[in-house]
């Protein structure tokens, strides 16, 4: 069976943004193949790496990581449910953050003008068990989780920061 | 059982404790306010002095205004029957303007939790003389008198705290039960905290909140973990013995996983018990398997959850202010999970769901949020710096309501699972007593795992823990009214086992358990009852039983875990289906029946024996049919004709001898069932081949059990049973001539 063609995209503002403010970054996952694909969006713990799928963001300046998710206080992540799985028809895309964005991008404030690279890695390379929550988890979800293709994708976008505005 | 009565209503023989003004309770007249500001102002400010008399001639004496004592805190009623623990949350620091309570009932020597209530939006009326809080309560049971009025006299701070009078009312104005509750503590709840540490780690002590910038209004103070909870109204008493746990307990890799942490808790938590109790354990561990986390409430997978948490020193250590501040956060956060608090953004995932705070909960300035995830509604800045600049080292209001007023089982450690609400059965049934002085112990045993369709049989053992001995009744079978069995199914649903037939207890059957006879035993098939098959699905079941002693004590067993295996082969599947028909279930529960209504079920058991006779579960079909064949069976037909189906001793001998053969080792049926089956076999053998042949079976029975390495008192009892059965056989032979 051919590897499903899934495209992960980050999109920043069209032009330079003022330093001193968070930058809105849109996240999109698109099914570029010819068969439907099942994918979960960002779950509790996806961003800090305590559960799959991983959606691991980071911001780089001159190749150095200047923003990344903090350490999880604990691994007590909530349940994954049927409604968390999205069936993407060929050509269909969705925002895996449900419009909320990622905390790391939402909260990072570039301090000074210059070029910043926003990066996001999506990974589903794990057994279904590693997608499960630690409480109130209905294990009937394990079968649907098996439909998720194993993949690891990284997307980046460069954002130019201009002088701060008053 | 006491749970059948209602602590909010007056028992018919008891008079109402308080006179009520007719119509005064639920009228439509405006009340005196209900808001937080009003309550605080009313309780913290001294009452206004009365105006001096107009015609006073002498200069007025100086008015001494004594501040009034706060009425908030915990109160408790005394006496027999129901006791009420009341929490009054008006006035003082961050009042939630609620009253709540838990009822406990005492029967015999045991005290058990009954149920909880809360008044979420009371009317609070404060006068110079008293504080009155009243409103409709929300209960964990259907209360007969659901309106609650709490009245507390106001006294000066120099006087002892006054008691609270709690009056329950059936709307509109019928008085229900009344309780006088004396003041117990300014804290709403008290928890014992035992903290152990792994060798080489350094437990956190306290953090000075003024060391780094903090929000206006948050006073600088040295804040410890108990101090943080004290500010929430929860007393955390350091208790138990602080142990140093060897790092070897973490296994070869020296990092900790949940199972290792749980084992360390069981071994080192000196206050640990498998029952609900206000006790929690914190381990300062090294690091978690795989790293990446600062702590965990690791006790979320068994029947008594939320009793232990850990912090990982390798991730949180450091002496600088920011690190110490973060360490305090981690300790308080993980213990918050032990109180069944979820992360700020997870409240909607609780069962039942709870409301989220601002911006999907990410905007909560709470111990239960993550600093780096903090994200108030835009355009306010989020992230770690914003969190710390706004965090006043406290829980949110909703979290305070849970900690102070959450229903008992939702909060106390060892009760409801992490993230779960109430069970579906009577709230008292699956709880161990909070106090047990009965001197008795009830144990359950069974096979650890059952095949698909295998009849679920449990052994019950009642023993004394009192060296002086205890009088008991011998009704230990769930078919008797004095033993109940609760079963938690793999879905989490808890059901009460209801036997097909209840035995009416009209005999005394008193026994004394002592050194000569330390225990009595019974065996019960609980796989099928009035509600059908109880263990029909593969998965993990949890079983607990309760024995009501002659003095009314509720003796509750530990939880027995019993796993039903999925069928491994097509034959397993087929045999399971043959055993799990409705009629087969009834036949097994009755240990055989030749009634015409069970013809179809008996045919299915015949198919099982004919086509799958070598399957291990065929022993149950032989058992039911063998015992049935040993006795005459009287059937009253639909035409009201009495038909006697005669015993078939040869058939019974053939079937029960196979049961004996299959069960003499580790397989087959349980020991108590085998004991019964061999005594029936002896009767059948005697009828077929004479009394001597029956006696030989009984001698063999003694040998079989001597080979099973049972205790001497049990073997003594079995030998006695063998001799008694021989006597019965001899008497029967003599009677037959």
Image (tube, rainbow, N blue to C red):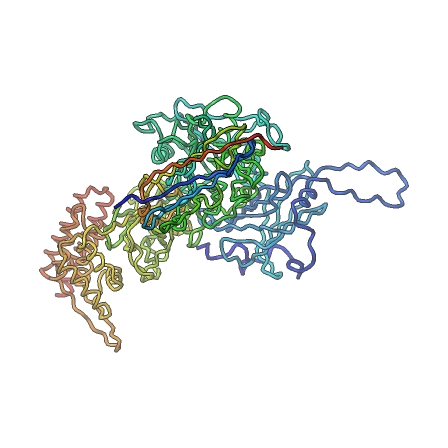
Q: Position of residue B678 (x, y in %)?
A: 17, 54
Q: Is residue B153 visible?
A: yes
Please count the marks in the image.
Answer: 0
Farthest residue to the front: give it. Answer: A15
As rendered, which of B90 and A112 lies closer to the eye? Answer: A112
As rendered, which of B537 and B133 lies closer to the eye? Answer: B537
For residue B197, above or below residue B635: above
Farthest residue to the left: give it. Answer: B689
Q: Position of residue B546 (x, y in %)?
A: 37, 50
Q: Is residue B437 visible?
A: no
Q: Is residue B340 left or right of residue B453?
A: right
Q: Position of residue B192 (x, y in %)?
A: 48, 35
**Residue at (64% x, 59% y) in the render:** B26
For residue A106, above or below residue B110: above
Snapshot quadrant of residue A73: top left
Tell me the quarter of the image containing the C terminus of chain B: bottom left
As rendered, which of B530 and B600 lies closer to the eye? Answer: B600
Q: Position of residue B233 (x, y in %)?
A: 57, 38
Tell me the quarter of the image containing the N terminus of chain B: bottom left
Q: Is residue B344 left or right of residue B595?
A: right
For residue B269, above or below residue B684: above
**Residue at (64% x, 51% y) in the render:** B123
Snapshot quadrant of residue A30: top left
């Amino acid at each position: 069976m051919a590897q499903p063609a899934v495209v992960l995209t980050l999109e920043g503002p069209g032009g330079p943004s003022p330093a001193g403010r968070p930058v809105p970054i849109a996240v999109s996952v698109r099914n570029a193949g010819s068969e439907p694909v099942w994918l979960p969006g960002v779950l509790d713990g996806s961003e800090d790496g305590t559960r799959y799928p991983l959606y691991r963001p980071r911001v780089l300046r001159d190749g150095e990581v200047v923003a990344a998710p903090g350490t999880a206080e604990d691994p007590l992540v909530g349940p994954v449910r049927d409604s968390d799985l999205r069936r993407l028809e060929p050509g269909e895309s969705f925002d895996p953050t449900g419009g909320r964005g990622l905390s790391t991008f939402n909260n990072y404030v570039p301090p000074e003008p210059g070029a910043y690279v926003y990066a996001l890695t999506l990974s589903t390379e794990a057994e279904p068990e590693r997608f499960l929550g630690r409480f109130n988890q209905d294990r009937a979800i394990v079968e649907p989780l098996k439909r998720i293709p194993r993949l690891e994708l990284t997307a980046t976008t460069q954002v130019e920061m201009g002088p701060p505005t008053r | 059982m006491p749970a059948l009565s209602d602590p909010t209503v007056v028992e018919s023989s008891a008079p109402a404790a308080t006179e009520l003004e007719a119509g005064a309770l639920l009228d439509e007249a405006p009340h005196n306010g209900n808001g937080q500001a009003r309550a605080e102002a009313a309780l913290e400010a001294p009452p206004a002095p009365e105006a001096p008399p107009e015609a006073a001639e002498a200069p007025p004496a100086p008015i001494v205004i004594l501040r009034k004592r706060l009425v908030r805190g915990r109160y408790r009623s005394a006496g027999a029957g129901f006791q009420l623990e009341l929490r009054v949350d008006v006035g003082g620091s961050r009042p939630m303007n609620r009253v709540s309570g838990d009822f406990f009932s005492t029967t015999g020597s045991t005290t058990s939790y009954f149920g909880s209530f809360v008044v979420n939006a009371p009317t609070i009326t404060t006068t110079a003389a008293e504080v009155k809080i009243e409103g409709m309560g929300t209960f964990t049971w259907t209360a007969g008198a659901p309106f609650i009025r709490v009245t507390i006299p106001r006294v000066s701070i120099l006087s002892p705290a006054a008691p609270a009078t709690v009056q329950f009312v059936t709307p509109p104005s019928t008085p229900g039960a009344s309780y006088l509750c004396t003041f117990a503590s300014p804290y709403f709840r008290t928890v014992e905290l035992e903290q152990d540490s792994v060798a080489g780690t350094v437990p956190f002590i306290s953090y000075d909140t003024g060391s780094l910038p903090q929000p206006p209004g948050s006073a600088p103070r040295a804040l410890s973990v108990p101090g943080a909870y004290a500010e929430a109204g929860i007393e955390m008493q350091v208790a138990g013995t602080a142990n140093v746990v060897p790092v070897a307990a973490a296994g070869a890799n020296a990092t900790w996983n949940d199972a290792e942490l749980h084992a360390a808790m069981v071994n080192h938590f000196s206050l640990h018990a498998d029952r609900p109790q206000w006790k929690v354990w914190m381990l300062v561990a090294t690091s978690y398997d795989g790293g990446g986390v600062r702590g965990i409430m690791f006790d979320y997978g068994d029947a008594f959850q939320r009793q232990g948490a850990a912090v990982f020193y390798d991730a949180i250590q450091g002496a600088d202010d920011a690190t110490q501040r973060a360490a305090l956060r981690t300790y308080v956060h993980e213990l918050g999970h032990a109180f069944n608090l979820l992360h700020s953004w997870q409240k909607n995932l609780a069962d039942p769901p709870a409301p989220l705070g601002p911006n999907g909960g990410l905007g909560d300035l709470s111990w239960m949020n993550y600093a780096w995830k903090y994200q108030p509604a835009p355009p306010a800045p989020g992230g770690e710096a914003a969190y710390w600049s706004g965090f006043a080292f406290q829980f949110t209001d909703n979290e305070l309501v849970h900690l102070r007023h959450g229903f008992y089982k939702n909060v106390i450690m060892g009760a409801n699972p992490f993230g779960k609400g109430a069970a579906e059965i009577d709230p008292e049934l699956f709880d161990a007593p909070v106090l047990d002085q009965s001197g008795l112990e009830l144990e359950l045993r069974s096979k650890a795992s059952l095949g698909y369709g295998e009849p679920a049989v449990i052994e019950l053992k009642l023993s004394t823990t009192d060296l002086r001995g205890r009088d008991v009744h011998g009704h230990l079978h769930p078919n008797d009214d004095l033993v109940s069995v609760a079963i938690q199914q793999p879905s989490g649903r808890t059901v009460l086992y209801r036997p097909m037939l209840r035995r009416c207890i009209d005999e005394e059957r008193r026994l004394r358990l002592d050194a000569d006879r330390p225990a009595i035993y019974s065996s019960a098939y609980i796989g099928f009852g009035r509600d059908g098959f109880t263990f029909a699905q593969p998965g993990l079941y949890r079983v607990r039983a309760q024995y009501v002693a002659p003095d009314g004590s509720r003796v509750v067993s530990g939880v027995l875990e019993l796993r039903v295996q999925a069928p491994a082969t097509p034959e397993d599947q087929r045999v399971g289906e043959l055993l799990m028909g409705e009629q087969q279930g009834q036949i097994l529960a009755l240990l055989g029946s030749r009634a015409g209504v069970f013809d179809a079920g008996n045919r299915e058991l015949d198919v099982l024996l004919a086509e799958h006779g070598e399957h291990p579960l065929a022993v149950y079909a032989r058992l039911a049919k063998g015992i049935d064949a040993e006795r005459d069976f009287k059937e009253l037909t639909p035409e009201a004709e009495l038909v006697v189906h005669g015993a078939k001793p040869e058939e019974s001998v053939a079937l029960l001898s196979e049961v004996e053969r299959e069960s003499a080792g580790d397989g087959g049926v349980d020991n108590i069932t085998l004991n019964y089956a061999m005594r029936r076999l002896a009767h059948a053998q005697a009828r077929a081949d004479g009394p001597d042949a029956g006696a030989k079976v009984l001698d063999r029975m003694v040998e079989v059990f001597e080979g099973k390495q049972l205790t001497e008192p049990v073997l003594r009892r079995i030998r006695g049973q063998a001799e008694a059965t021989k006597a019965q056989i001899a008497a029967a032979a003599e009677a037959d001539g």
